[in-house]
Image (cartoon, grey):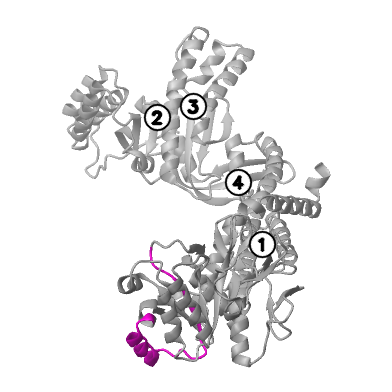
Amino acid sequence: MKHIFKNTNLLTVLLSLFIIVVLLACSSLFRVLNKTIQNEYYTVKNEILWVTANPHIIIVEIDEKSFESIGSFPFLRSVYAQVIENLNKEDISVIAFDMLFLDATSPNEDEIFIQSLKNSEASVVLWNATDSQGVIETPIELIPEFIYDDGFLAPNVEYSNKTVYSFSPKISDYSGNTFEHFTIRILRNFYDYMYWSSTRENIWNYQDKYYSLSDDYLFPLASKNSQEILINFIPENSFTRVSLSDVYDTDNFETLRKDIDFRDSIILIGPTADGLKDNFFTPNGYEYWVNIHANILNTLLTKSFMMYFDPTLEWVLIFLIVILSVSLNLSASSRLLLTGNFLIILIFWIIIPVSILLWTNLILNFPTEIIFSLILSILVANIMKYLIEDKNKQKLNKALSEYVWSHIAAEILDEDGSIDFDGQEKNLVCFFSDIEWFTSLSEVLTATELVAFLRVYLTIMTESIMDQKWYVDKFEGDAIMALWGAFSKQQDTIDDSMRACTTALIHQEAIENINLEWKEKLQRSLRVRIGIHSGKAIIGNIWALWKKMSFTALWDNINLASRLEGANKYYGTLICVSETVYEDTYESFEYRFLDEIQVKWKDISVKIYELLTRKWELAEDKALQIQKFSEARHLYTQKKFIEAQALFRELANLWDAPSQYYAERCSGFQKNPPASDWTWVWRMTDK
């Protein structure tokens, strides 16, 4: 099995064969979809090529107008006699009735109709039907056979969607009698009339890909060895259509003769009125049989024959799509994958179908399979590719997780490992934390206990904030340096700052639990100071050639974050952030503006803020203290040090550490007032 996964060519062939088997198994399910697509094929082809009807075909409709003019249906047979008589005023080739004359009516009516058939110069074709026992029923015995022709009318209905696509040129009943289709009989009479030749004595036979009407007239079958001819349907309004009432009325027919050329025409007479049940589903929609007959005749006369594409060749085409797509999708090159699939879609979904549509009368047997072959190939190949790559990623992730956290390793792998470890400038959010007076712990803990404590402390602190997607750059004893944005391609400094601040608050909550567990051994409660700053920094490998390598971040902004952590010990705070972090997050957290400072060895000042809690979670008494602190600091900036000191001492008595620090400053400025150009910026003399 491992050998198969490693051999891409073998895997491609096996997956392709699997997909072909699936498509073959689902062919019956795709049948309705295939027929639906074929229906659209007719519509699109006719709209593009502007297909028109043969002018010899004229439909005489038994429509609502006929009912209003003549009366209720079925009409008296004398009505049809009059229609035949009027039509014979023109040189009509064939008159075909799309209706049954199985039963006798009144002797007088039947005699009038029979006489009209005898007197008709045009050939008359009637149709017979198949009864429930499969026996062909012919027109009434009263009508002499020599005065008319007939043909069966059984439709070929596709079982999957009850739609008519084809007709059978001939059938045999249970008695062994052979009957030609109604339209074939019409066509024989038409050819006899037009070319003064007889096709009636020819043997009706199927010859390989054709139905032989005579040596001169071969009609292509739907496919090799089939016994049906596909109907090339065109819109019903393409045919010349007149109402039976206008042909029946002698005066109206005289007017029609001036507008319509009836010479040499085939007249199809049949019902089209609403409510009559002589209709079927076709690619054109719900149509009456007379329209279907017109389409059959038009197909045969215009020689616009439809044929199915060779199914074997079509499956070869599908297999070619599958094996090309699978091979491309197993490829490691995303550019090749995208380009290849685009070309497959272009060639097999657009160029080939459009070429077949415009320049041939072929119909694809399996258009759905062609579409799904590509979709299934992409799906199966990418699932397999994912499984293979996921297994490799798991191995790499395990190795990489020894150096960075697993979600960071996953992010690197998701980026195809495209991290520049040699150094690059990025916007980072840097987080420093440190335990206050950590060195004093060595006085109360043994070396073994100190290591055990650090293991617990670092594990709890790390695990408590893993979900914030941080990267721990280093541990330095109890100190932690973490970075956000180190590996992200799409950088979001606001989101990174939010996560860093959330981490700081979680950190403080976690230290409370640690204090509960270790307070007895440590003999005091621990405080953890945190500094956060965001800005540009250089991140990459810092290394001594062939000796040691370390992946870390450098630059002034990293140093500033470290200085902010140290600033906490002066102000008595726990979390100190820079102005850039405050600007990104002030809508989500509660802050106190602490000061504007210059850290040691820096000339540029920075505003710093104390992170207090999440937004709307600040206690009311604490909020009042913060407000008073702001008032006291305003007095401080106005050099009103006595008034400011009074307020600061009041707050210091409420255990507000920053106020205690400011009260001491005010005392110093009272003794040594600042210069006249004082800008309130406090310069830190220690780290």
Disc 4 versus disc 1: distance between alpha carbons?
A: 19 Å
- Residue 326 sits in quarter: bottom right
Mark closer to the chain start, 4 or 3: 4
Left or right of 226? Residue 122 is left
Instruction: Give the residue type at disc 2.
Output: Ile
Q: Amino acid at mark 3?
A: Asp
Quickly name the residue at label 2: 575
Identify the element where label 4 is drawn: helix
Position in image of residue 118 (x %, y %): 53, 83
Over which residues does the magenta segment extend? 248-274
Secondary structure of the residue carrying tag 3 is: strand
The residue that disc 4 covers is: 414
In terms of depth relative to the viewer, which is nearer, 686 or 434?
Answer: 434
Residue 46 at x, y = what percent? 51, 76
Which amino acid is tagged 4?
Answer: Asp
Nearest to viewer (mark 1 / mark 3): 1
Q: Which mark is residue 336?
A: 1
- Near-viewer residue (71 or 443): 71
Q: Disc 4 and disc 2: Cα gap in Å?
A: 33 Å
Instruction: Check contact, mark 1 vs mark 3: CB within 8 A.
Output: no
